[in-house]
Amino acid sequence: MTQEHHSKPSSLAGRARRLFSRENLPRSRAARIAIGVLLVGGGLVGFLPILGFWMVPMGLTVLAIDIPVVRRFTRKVTVGAKRLWHKLRS
C-alpha cells in the first residue's frame, strides 16, 4: 500500500515569497534594485524569445522589497485581483 502525501497546494504568492526571500536575493540594495529594473525592462520586450511578460510581475516583486511606492502598488493590485477572483467565483 502506498501512502499518499496530502499537502496543501501552495499558492502562487507563497511560491513567489519563497523564490524572492532575502536568502535568494543579493544583500546589496542596489543589486536588488538593478535586478528588479532589469526584470521589468526585459518583460516590456516580452514578445522576444526567452524574455517574457512574466518578468514584469517578478521584477515588481523584487523592487517592492526596497521601494515603498512599488510595495503599495503591488499590494493594491494583489488585493484587487483577489477581490475580482472571489467575485467571479461566486
Image (cartoon, helix red, strand yellow):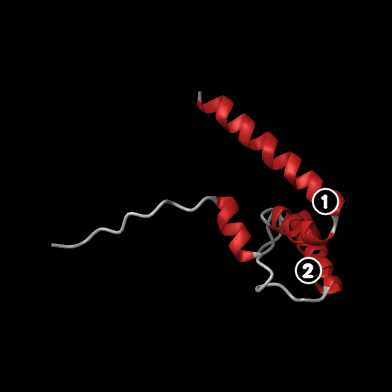
The image quarter in which residue 54 lies: bottom right
Which numbered dot is residue 20? Answer: none
Which residue position is annotated with label 1?
70
Count of marks, rendered view: 2
Give above or below for 90 relative to 50: above
Taking the view exactly as shown, the residue that stands out farthest to the bottom is 27
Which residue position is annotated with label 2?
35
Sequence-wise, the earlier of marks 2 and 1 is 2
- Tell me the quarter of the image containing the N terminus: bottom left
Image point 79% across, 69% down: which residue? 32
The image quarter in which residue 65 lies: bottom right
> Which amino acid, by three-letter code, is at mark 2?
Ile
Q: From the top left corner, tell me how far across and down residue 42 is, in percent.
A: 77, 61
Give above or below for 28 relative to 50: below
- Binning the other alpha carbons within 10 Å of mark 1 as few (below 14), some (14 to 19) or many (20 upward) gives some
Taking the view exactly as shown, the residue that stands out farthest to the left is 1
